[in-house]
Amino acid sequence: MITETVDSRWSSLYRLGGVVAIAIAILLLGESVVYAVLPNRSTPVEFLAQFRDNWFLGLLNFDLLGMIAYLLFIPFILSLYVALRRTNEAVMIVGTVLFLVGIAVFFSTNTAFPMLSLSGQYEAANTEAERAMLLAASQAMITLFKVNAFMVSYVIFSAAWLLIAAVMLRSKVFSKLTAVVGIMAGAAGIVAEMLEHISETFRTIAIFLYFAAIVFLLLWVVLSGRRLYNLGANSHKA
């Protein structure tokens, strides 16, 4: 039995964190399906054509579901901060701030909507010079998204999850299983990013670790969310 040492004043936030955790898990699953099913695009012409043919699929390719999920992560992480701050407030502050920094990096460098705008301009261009300029701009947007919006922000997010889950290990509120799963999610994500960019030799291992990180993250979110909701419901009754 896990001892509940939580502040009942935050029962509504706990329940909100539990509810959004389910939505986050669904979005993360949907994101995995999108990247597995949608055709792989590599050139600016291919991306612009996808936006032209179906703007929604184009946005999905640029992590639309991830954008929604990360916004929902905000109340989830805040509810974890409130539940765990008595265990180690310093680390929880660092983890929470890291996550918010990751949010800022992700949204400031996600180029989904600029690409949507460029696709319309590309179709309306009348000269080859205009098209060449728009293709160059599109390549810059693609590179910015792949390098900063995904790689940099994902490492920051993973570090935040790792720190928060580490605090869970010493907490009487969450189970050790939940903490270990969260630590694995953060560690696998960081190592995967490092291996992918060290050498093509490690690409297969990196892909496996990405998959493992997603699975661990889903489990961590669901387990943490269930616990948060129960804490909120019990605190409200009390």
Image (cartoon, rainbow, N blue to C red):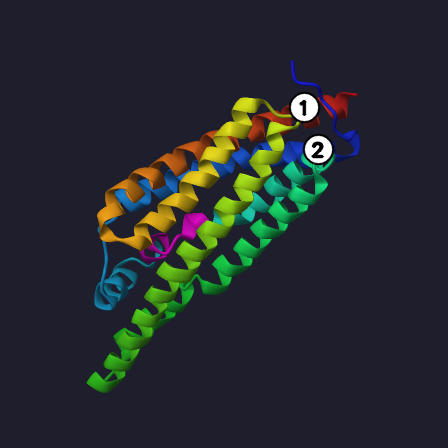
Residue 181: x and y in percent read: 48, 29
Residue 35: x and y in percent read: 30, 46
Residue 130: x and y in percent read: 27, 84
Rendered image: mark on residue 164: none
Q: Is residue 115 magenta?
A: no
Taking the spot 38% from the left edge, 66% from the top edge, the residue there is 144
What amino acid type is highlighted by mark number 1? Lys
- Along the line of sight, which residue is nearer the eye, 38 or 169? 169
Badge 1 marks a residue whose secondary structure is: loop
- Along the line of sight, which residue is nearer the eye, 54 or 2? 2
- Along the line of sight, which residue is nearer the eye, 132 or 153? 153
**Residue bearing mark 1:** 172
What amino acid type is highlighted by mark number 2? Thr
Q: Which residues are magenta?
A: 57-67
For residue 9, which quarter of the picture?
top right
For residue 148, which quarter of the picture?
bottom left
Q: Earlier in the sequence, mark 1 or mark 2?
A: 2
For residue 5, which quarter of the picture?
top right
Q: Is residue 60 magenta?
A: yes
Q: Which quarter of the rendered picture does the C terminus lie within?
A: top right
Residue 54: x and y in percent read: 29, 57
Taking the spot 40% from the left edge, 33% from the top edge, the residue there is 215
Majority SS type along the magenta span = helix
**Residue bearing mark 2:** 87
